[in-house]
Each structure stands twice: as structure tokens, then as C-alpha cells.
Amino acid sequence: MNIAKYMEAIVIAVIAVAAAASMATASVPSLRTAQAPAVSEVVTHVVYVSAKRLSAEEKAAL
């Protein structure tokens, strides 16, 4: 019997069995709803960037 001749079919069968076993034993997590944060807990971060703009000559030098 030439096993090398049927190696592709064997690999595909093993993958199919492993996938079926994985799906059969997977547990479904219970439904959880997201809790909205209270208004006082919401923090908005503001970033101020202060810098002078480059002139055309300075940009050309880069």
C-alpha cells in the first residue's frame, strides 16, 4: 500500500475531523451587554500644538 499516494487525502481528512471536533466542543459565551460609563467618568483629552510655521525658504532647505 502506497501511503504517500494518499497523503493529501489523509491530511484533508485529519483537518476536517479536527475542525469538527473543535466546533463540537466549543462553548458559547453568555451574552454580556456593555455598560455605558457615567457622564462624570468621560474624559476628553485635548492636545494643543504650538509651533511656528516654516517659511518657504526653510521648507526648501529641508
Image: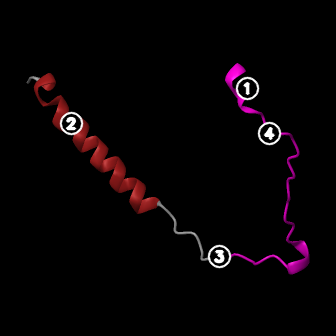
Q: What residue type is labelled 2?
A: Ile
Compare marks 2 and 1 and give the one earlier in the sequence. 2
Q: Where in the figure is residue 30, as x and y percent of width and height?
A: 60, 74
Q: Where is residue 12 in the image (x, y as percent from the top left)?
A: 23, 41
Q: Residue 32 carries which label?
A: 3
- Side (left or right) of 26 relative to 7: right
Mark 2 or mark 3: name the one nearer the start of the chain: 2
Q: Name the residue under label 4.
A: 53
Residue 17 visible within the image = yes
Q: Nearer the viewer, residue 40 or 62?
A: 62
- The residue at the far right in this view is 40
Label 3's element?
Answer: loop
* Real-space Cα separation, disc 2 to disc 3, in angstroms: 41 Å
Q: Counting other residues with Cα less than 10 Å from the Cα at mark 4, is it few (<14), some (14-19), or many (20 or more)?
A: few
Up the image or down, 39 lies above or below 51; here it is below
Q: Position of residue 1 (x, y in %)?
A: 8, 24
Disc 4 to disc 2, C-alpha distance: 67 Å
Residue linked to disc 1: 57
